[in-house]
Amino acid sequence: MIENEWLKKYADKVRKADYIDPALYRKYGVKRGLRNDDGTGVLVGLTTIGNVHGYVVDEGEKKAVPGELYYRGISVKDLVVADRKEHRYGYEEAAYLLMFGDLPTAKQLKDWRAKLGAYRKLSDGFKENAILRHPSVDIMNGIARAILFAMAFEGKPEEETLNDISIETCLERSIALISAFPTIAAYAYQAKTHYHMGGSLMIRNPDPKKSTSENFLSLIREDGKYTKLEAETLDLSLILHAEHGGGNNSSFVTHVVTSAHTDIYSSMAASVLSLKGSRHGGANLRVMRQMDEIKANVKDWRDTNQVIAYLEKIVDKEAGDRTGLIYGLGHAVYTVSDPRAQLLKQKARELAKAKKRTDEMKLFELIETHGPAIIKARHPRAEDVCANVDLYSGFVYEMMGIPRDLYTPLFAIARCVSWCAHRMEELINKGPIIRPAYKPLYKPRKYVLIKDRK
C-alpha cells in the first residue's frame, strides 16, 4: 500500500506534467474526441453495418431531423414492427442481418438459431476457471476476463492457430462468443451474488431452443420463470442496443484494436471495457439514480408542477449530482427524437400496466415532455434535446426485477454481435493500423547527469 502523502505529492506532479492549456487545442485545430467544432463526428471510416441519423447539414448548417437507426440499410422500426406482427423474438434475426448483410429466410433463421443454441452452454472447466474462481465484484470486468480466458479453451492451443485472423476463423469464434455471452454475463452475476453478497450460488444450464432474452431471464432468476411480455420486452431492448454505427466508442475500439491484427478475444474484451465506462454504457444507471432522488425529494411526484420545479433545480445545479444534467435527455446524434426511446416507451407502457406501475411510467413521460424545454430555457443556444433510450431502458429492467448490476452487461450482450461485425469489416477491408496524430508541445531539453540534478 502506497502512503497517501506520497500519492498526493506525486499526483500533483503528474497533473503539472500532463496539463495542456485548452486554448492550444483551438490554436492547432485539434479535433478533440474526434469531433468537429459543431459537434459532428470526424469522418474516419466507412461502414456497411449500421447508421445513426439525427441531423442533416444544409449549406454548412446542422439542422435537426427526426432520428432514424438503420441496420444494413433497414430501419430498426421496420424490424420491430415485423417481429410484433409475427409474434416472435427478433434479436436473432437482427443479429443475422448485422453479421451477414441480409435478412434471413425462414430456413436460414432456423439454422442460425440452432447454431447459436449449440454454443450457449459453457463447459464445466470454463465455468469453474474463468468465472467462479476469483469472481469479480464488477461484472463487466468479470465478463472481459472470461472472454480473454476463452482463448485457453480453444481446441487447438498452438499460438499460430490462436492468433488466426482469417474470416472463417473469425466467424466461428464470433458465433461462439455471441452465443455464450448471455450465459457468461448471467454466471458472472450469480458468482458475484454468492461470493461477494452472501447469496446462494445458482447455476442453471441454458436451453438451446430458447431465444437470447428467454435464456437470460431464466439464468438470472431463482425459479427460472418469466412471462411472455417480459421476454418480449427484453428482446426488444436487445434489438435496439445491438448496433449504433461504427463511431460509438466501443465499436470504434473494436476497429482500433482489430487494426493491430490481434485476436478476437482481445478485441472483444477491449470493447467490453470501453462500454463499461460511465460515459458510454452506464447511462441508464445514472437515470435510475436520478429518478430515485426525484422520488425521494419531490413530495408528490405525480404533481407536474412539483416535478418541473425539481427538474429546474437539477438544471440549475442545485440538485442531482450538480452537473446540471437531466439524465435520459440529450444525445450526441439524435436531436428531435431517438427512435429507440420511442419504440421502448411503447413496450414500457405495456409492462408498467402489467406490473401496476403506471404512476411511475407517467413520471418518466413527464420528464420527457417538460425536460427539454427547461434545458432550452436556461441554455438558449443549446441544440434540440430529446429523450434517449436510457430514459426508459433502466425502468424497463427494474420492472422486470433485473438487478442494476446487470444493466450494462445487458447492453454488452446486445452489442456483442455488432462488435463482431465491425471486426470482420476491419479485417476484410485490410486497412492500415489506426494511428491518429498527436502534436508534441515540449521543447527539446538536454539530459542532465543524476549528480547535477536538483
Image (tube, rainbow, N blue to C red):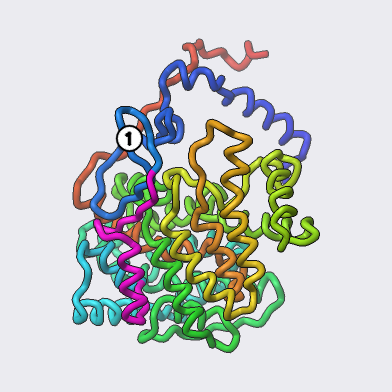
Query: Considering only vertical position in the picture, is 239 above or below 17?
Result: below
The residue at 44%/51% (across/down) is 337
Eyeballing the image, is 14 above or below 66?
A: above
Q: State left or right for residue 449 relative to residue 124.
A: right
Q: Amino acid at mark 1?
A: Val
Label 1 crowding class (10 Å Cα cut-off): few <14, some 14-19, many 20+? Answer: few
Residue 34 in the image: state x and y as whole percent. 40, 34
**Residue drawn 57% across the image and 32% down it:** 380
Residue 78 in magenta stretch: yes
- Would residue 161 appear left or right of 272 to someone viewing this image? left
Q: Is residue 240 visible?
A: yes
Q: Is residue 197 left or right of residue 59?
A: right
Instruction: Let me know if residue 252 appears in the view.
Output: no
Identify the image quadrant of the C terminus. top right
The residue sitting at 39% across, 36% down in the picture is: 40
Q: What is the secondary structure assignment of the residue under circle 1? A: strand
Q: Estimate the x, y position of residue 288 in percent, counting from the top left.
A: 64, 60
Rendering quarter of residue 236: bottom left
Number of residue marks: 1
Camera-nearest residue between 96 and 237: 237
- Per the rendered image, the range of residues in magenta is 65-90
Instruction: Specify the quadrant of the image occupied by residue 120.
Output: bottom left
Indicate the position of residue 141 as horizontal and vertical percent values.
Answer: 54, 59
Q: Mark 1 sits on what residue?
A: 57
Q: Looking at the picture, does residue 232 appear above or below residue 158?
A: below
Q: Nearer the viewer, residue 163 or 73?
A: 73
Q: Is residue 361 magenta?
A: no
Rendering quarter of residue 162: bottom left
Q: Position of residue 84 (x, y in %)?
A: 36, 76
Q: Is residue 21 left or right of residue 75?
A: right
Relative to 218, is 300 above or below?
Answer: above
